[in-house]
Structures are given as C-alpha cells and as structure tokens.
Image: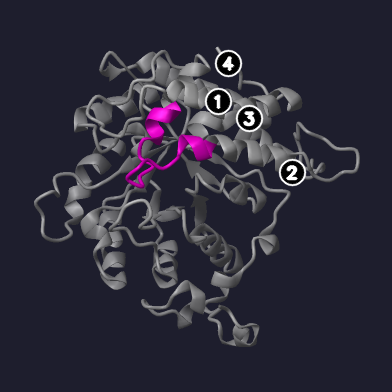
Amino acid sequence: MHDSNDSCNLISNPSELKPTTTWMETKWGWTSEDSLIDHHTRARLCSAVLLPFHHGKPDWQSFHDSIRWMMASADYYGVEFVPVLNADTGYIFQLDNDTYAEVLRRFRSEFPDSKFIAGVTARGAESDSEFLAERYHPLLDIAQEHDNCEIMIMTSFWLNSLCPEKRRDGYFDIAKRLERPGIVHALEPSFVSWATPFEPWLLWQLANHPKIVGGKVSTLDVPHFLYWSAMCKDLSLDFSSHSGDDFGIATAIKIGMPLLIGAASSSSPLICAAKDMWLDNNVAGKKFPTRHGQYDTRVYKLFEAIQSLEDQVFRFDTTGSVAAYKHSTAHVLNLMGIIQSAEPHPDCNDRRDSNESNAMQQAMIRPQRMAKMLDIPYFGVS
C-alpha cells in the first residue's frame, strides 16, 4: 500500500527510470483519474472492425455496411473515427496473407479518403527459438502499400519474451521497416498468459522513437492505461496513449484520450454520444447542450449502459477466456440488421453456444432503452 509520506521518493523525472523500475515506484502509478479529467477534448475513436462471414466466406457487403454504420454515428457527433483493420476482432490470427491484403484493398476501394490502422504481427514464428524482426515484414509490407494509414505493431511471443532493453531493441528493429506512423501494443497476462505490460522505462523509450506516434494497452486487472496517460500528459510526450480497455470504456472518455477497442464495433453510436455528453457546452458542435453550461450528467447512466452491454459481449467462458467476444459482436450486429449473418471465421474456435442471439438480445435491452431516452440514432433493432 502506498504511504503518502513516501510521495517525495516517487520518480517523476524520466532520466531516473531504469529498465526494472515498476509503475508503483513512479508518480504516474499513483496519479488519480480525477486529476486527469478533461471536458474539452473530443478524442478519436478507433474501432477494431469485425470481419463478418457468411457461408464460410468473408461477407464484404456486411464488412462495408458495418463500417458505414460506425462512420455515420461518429459523423453525427463530430468524432474522428479510424477503423482498425486486421486486428484480433478482424481475425488476424486466422487470416492468410492474401485475405489480409484483400481486407485492406476492399476497404481502400470503398473508402478511398479514410484513414485506417492496420494490425501487423509475426508470421511464421511457430518454430522459432528467438525473436526475429523480419517475421513482421510480410504484413508490414502489405499494409504499407497503402497511404493514409497507421501500423499497429501487435505483440508476439518472442518479442514479449525479451527483457526490457532487448524488447525495446526489438521494437526499434521492427520500426526500421516502418514507412507509416507506428502504434505499439501491450497486453496484460490476463489476456494472454505470456504477455507482460510495458514497464515505465520501456514506454518512455518507445514514446520517444520518431516513427512511433502512439500505443494501445489492453488492460483488465491493473490500470496500465491510467499510468500511460498520466506519464504522457505530465511529460507532454508526442505520443498518443489509446485505451484498449473494453472493460473500462468510460475512463478514456473522462480523461480525453482515444479509445482503440473491439467494443466500438458493437456500441459505436453509444460511445460517440457519451463522448459528446461529457463535453462542456463551450465545445463547438456539441449535440447535448445543457442550460448550465457544463457537461450532461446523464452521461453517467449512459456509461453504465455501454459497459453493461460490453461486459456481456466480452464475458469470460469456462476456461477464463474472453476471445469469443468476436462471435458475440457478430450477434449484436446481426440483431441490428447491420450484417446478414453472425457466423465467425470458419477456422476460429472461439465461439459462443447456440443461445447467443438470445443472450445478446437481453444484453441490449438497457443500452437500447438509454438510446431511445436520449434520442441517440443508429442503435435500433432490425
């Protein structure tokens, strides 16, 4: 437990960080959410896009329709929307390189002026005994055929196995190949058993690389996103911390930081509305003005409604995994008539049971009540 008398001993100067320094040894590990509250920044929403399937094949029309649905709600509330393609929600670990490339080509053909983020990971490393940066090159090269995009460097077993100094060097080796802005990705072991989040020293090192413009941290048990945001805001780093926390969506909205989550694929209209309601009245283009000039306090109930849905979409199975969230997301989109089938990728074993449509229909009751009460468009039932 933190002793307030030890506050003066907490590290606040990044030059004092060591590779082994823990977040609890820094001031950023003890920064409260309340001290970071921001009612003026309309941060971007990056949605990890679901790749829908029908009769065992990618359903390209539904893919386009789901993106248009998210874009429409973002446009309505004046939120910058950036789709994240070929991440876990898009079945990157089941896609071959040809399908990976086709996803990007189809997107660019349908949305020629829109920015996207492409997930990249190591290919062909199954038999490796050490980290090899070149394993990232195939997907990097495919993604970087396109302009107006960012590259999310997803973690992998051998990259994550390195000590902090060598892990930094590994990211820097991958970055040598970067021709587009890069985003790094960290995971807690609650998602993947071998994963370890970034130490403060490693985040500082990566945040100062000229080709790396931001990062995403997926959290469940420890508030690493809060640590990242506290450090980046305090040091005015030119590095954008993105929340990958599908279990704590409100935090990023409250502190004016971007979200990069799969949950946006099923609740984008609600998230965009919540972003607007959290803003003070003097922010241009606000859709939910209030008489007293401050933010709309009904947003707290909207936060609850969003989380009640996503806690069911991302619920744990009997093995302690949330990986079947993709199947749940497909059911939500199918119930709203946005995609024509709730089929998962045929090679993906992360599936819900035959009652999932009913489970998601129940999970949507409260958020749909809130959407109706607050007149939030684009969140109805087919």
Mark before the other along the chain sequence, 3 or 1? 1
Tell me where residue 178 appears, x and y as whole percent: 31, 50
- Mark 3 packing: few (<14 Cα in 10 Å), some, or many (20+)? many
- Please state the extent of the stretch shown in magenta in the rendering: 310-329
Residue 311 magenta-highlighted: yes
Tag 1: amino acid: Gln
Q: CA distance from mark 3 to mark 1?
A: 10 Å
Q: CA distance from mark 1 to mark 2?
A: 30 Å
Q: Residue at x 26, y 33 (%)?
A: 349
Closer mark to the observer between disc 3 and disc 1 = 1
Q: Residue at x 66, y 21 (%)?
A: 377
Residue labelled with disc 4: 381
The numbered disc on residue 367 is 3
Q: CA distance from mark 3 to mark 4?
A: 12 Å
- Mark 1 packing: few (<14 Cα in 10 Å), some, or many (20+)? few
Tag 4: amino acid: Val
Secondary structure beneath label 2? loop
Mark before the other along the chain sequence, 1 or 4? 1
Q: Quadrant of residue 207?
A: bottom left
Tag 2: amino acid: Leu
Mark before the other along the chain sequence, 3 or 4? 3
**With 201 as the anchor, is 145 left or right in this view?**
left
Residue labelled with disc 2: 279
The numbered disc on residue 362 is 1
109, 191: nearer the viewer: 191
Tell me where residue 170 appears, x and y as whole percent: 26, 62
Query: Which residue in the rendered view is the most extreme toward the right?
Result: 291
Secondary structure beneath label 4? loop
The numbered disc on residue 200 is none
28, 353: nearer the viewer: 353
Q: Quadrant of residue 162?
A: bottom left
- Mark 4 packing: few (<14 Cα in 10 Å), some, or many (20+)? some
